[in-house]
Amino acid sequence: MNINIFLHFLILIPILGFLISLLLPPSNEKLNSRVAYYALGVQWFTLLGFILAWSLRGFQTIDIRDFVLFSTPGYEYFVDFYFDGISAVYMLVGTLLTFLITMYSRFYLHRESGYKRFFNTILFFYLGYTLVILSGNLETMFVGWEILGISSFLLIAFYRDRYLPVKNAVKVFSIYRVADVGLIVAMWMSHHLWHENTTFFKLSNYELVHHQLQEHSWIGIVVSLMILISAMAKSAQLPFSSWLPRAMEGPTPSSAIFYGSLSVHIGVFLLLRTFPFWEHQVSVRILIGLIGLFTAVATTGIARVQSSIKSQIAYSSIAQIGIIFIEVALGLKYLALLHFAGNAFLRTYQLLVSPSVVTYLIREQFYNFKLRPLTLEDSWPRRLEYSYYVLCLKEWNLDSLLYRYLWNPLKKLGNKLSFLTFTNALLILLPVLVFGLLLRTEEQWLPGSIHENLPELFSLLALIIVLKAFTERLHARLAWLLTVLNHCFLVLAISFNEHFGMEEVTLYLSGVLICGFFGWFILLRLKRLEGSINLDRFHGHSWLNPKLALGFLLCCLGVAGFPITPTFIGEDLLFSHIHEDQILLAVFTALSLIVNGLAIIRIYARVFLGPHSRSVYEMGYRSS
């Protein structure tokens, strides 16, 4: 019997479970929980049967090239699935923990208003997790990678009528967006390295990889660094560590499965999966080890001074993942897998019992007071000990560093574009776009020096447009229009770079324009119903308009290039037309995609999430 059929079942079961859960009535808690419970139970037994059959075949690596989604003479986007020992460990741990969390949540979330929404999102998350673990190339992995990002945002903002969960969900999504684009750039450079959509099975061929890296060493280093940035952001390594405690605003079960056990270890999985590629790049291995070491040292101290038990567990988990990074850099793959499994089970258990532990400790501190025992830091000089304590208390100013050197410069640039009102945007940008299209049709008359600079010029203009959308604080419809125009200018910029047909342009812009039109219509409808949809605060309009909120979320995903429209394939296709020596064009395009995703999710959060604008209750707008 062909055991590859079981591998397809491992992907099909989460898809069916998620689709069925969407059709269930919200009022029937028992039915919603049972669908998730049985879907994951069937998945668990199917996985056990598959691994048993796989072991009887001698643990042979499985690589299945399923089907081609899009193909041109110089480009092919196909779905590939891969299974080996790393996949087996991650699937066993992930399936068992998700199954246990589902059982726990059936009673923990009883009578919560978002009961159905929680189980929908958990099944959606597990679908993304399965696609990542069983992916056979970066393109297939990116589908699951995106699903993990949006499901994480939805679970952190589960209590969507509160200010802090929504605010922190946007913060976490901003870091995830960096990881997304890091993976896109890695895919872009891989296309230039291999001149094809390569698979992880091909990466295990040492002679092939060694030959390619000898001829294109700097491209190999760039690919490895982009993979490392994606892994760092996803696994909360320095300087991206501060997002993990902020993600604990969601329900305790989602914190356990996402930020204690599974999602936070996906960065480690990415490094393990691509290990044969960067295995012989000594500089990259040293960098991975140093990042893990610094993260472990810094977050261990931060964890010990936290006043919140969930934050303490979060930073402790980051420290352990830092040690796993060191193990991966040293080539200790089996130790890293064992460490992952142990850390995942431990942090899940700690988070699930954390409410009870707090109760016990409050009682203990009144009746069994004990002096603080001496620690290693007490042997240090006082000045050094106190400095380390204050740094840990301030969490090493990680949030301030990201704001000062990443987000604030983008906001300052966007704020200087205050002249770009709705009317000016139509009067200036649309004629420029039409003029660019005319240049594109008559480019044979352009001088060579001008033609060479047009891609960078239009991509810079696209970046400027989306910066304005990101910093717009008044008109939601203006910000939405600018995000759509950003995609149009990106396509125009790359079209000057290489001659590609209307089929590829249509593939990219189809999802953007269709979802952009419906999103505009929803904002217009909401404006008539509510009056104010400015971006100066969270309005919480999903409370009275849940259907419009769901529709606009789908439009946001379509415009952002989520894998529900052909635009998802178009993003990878767009990067494939950027030459390896056009670093500036690649940087402008990557920054545009980062800021575009942030601007879109910011519009959705500000308009539909948070405390409702008509609420009679006062709401604190700053964290204590």
Image (cartoon, rainbow, N blue to C red):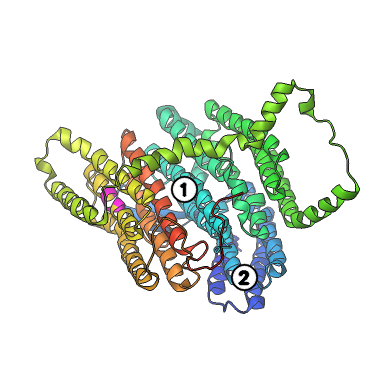
Circle number at residue 487 = none
Q: Position of residue 173 (x, y in %)?
A: 50, 51
User: Could you give the CA–CA distance between mark 1 and mark 2, rounded to whole angstroms?
Assistant: 27 Å
Name the residue that disc number 2 marks. 115
Name the residue that disc number 1 marks. 177
- Magenta region: 486-490
Q: What residue is rendered at 30% in x and 61% in y?
A: 513
Quadrant containing the N terminus is bottom right
Please tell me whether residue 487 belongs to the stretch shown in magenta. yes
Foreground of the two, 305 or 584: 305
The count of marks equals 2
Foreground of the two, 420 or 194: 420
Please tell me whether residue 316 belongs to the stretch shown in magenta. no
**The residue tagged with tag 2: helix, strand or loop?**
helix
Disc 2 marks which amino acid? Tyr
Outermost residue on the top side: it is 381
Q: Position of residue 604 (x, y in %)?
A: 43, 60
Disc 1: CA contacts within 10 A as few (<14), some (14-19) or many (>=20) = many
Outermost residue on the right side: it is 367
Disc 2: CA contacts within 10 A as few (<14), some (14-19) or many (>=20) = many
1 or 2: mark nearer the eye: 2
- In the image, residue 233 sits, relative to residue 221, either above or below, namely below
Q: Position of residue 424 (x, y in %)?
A: 22, 53
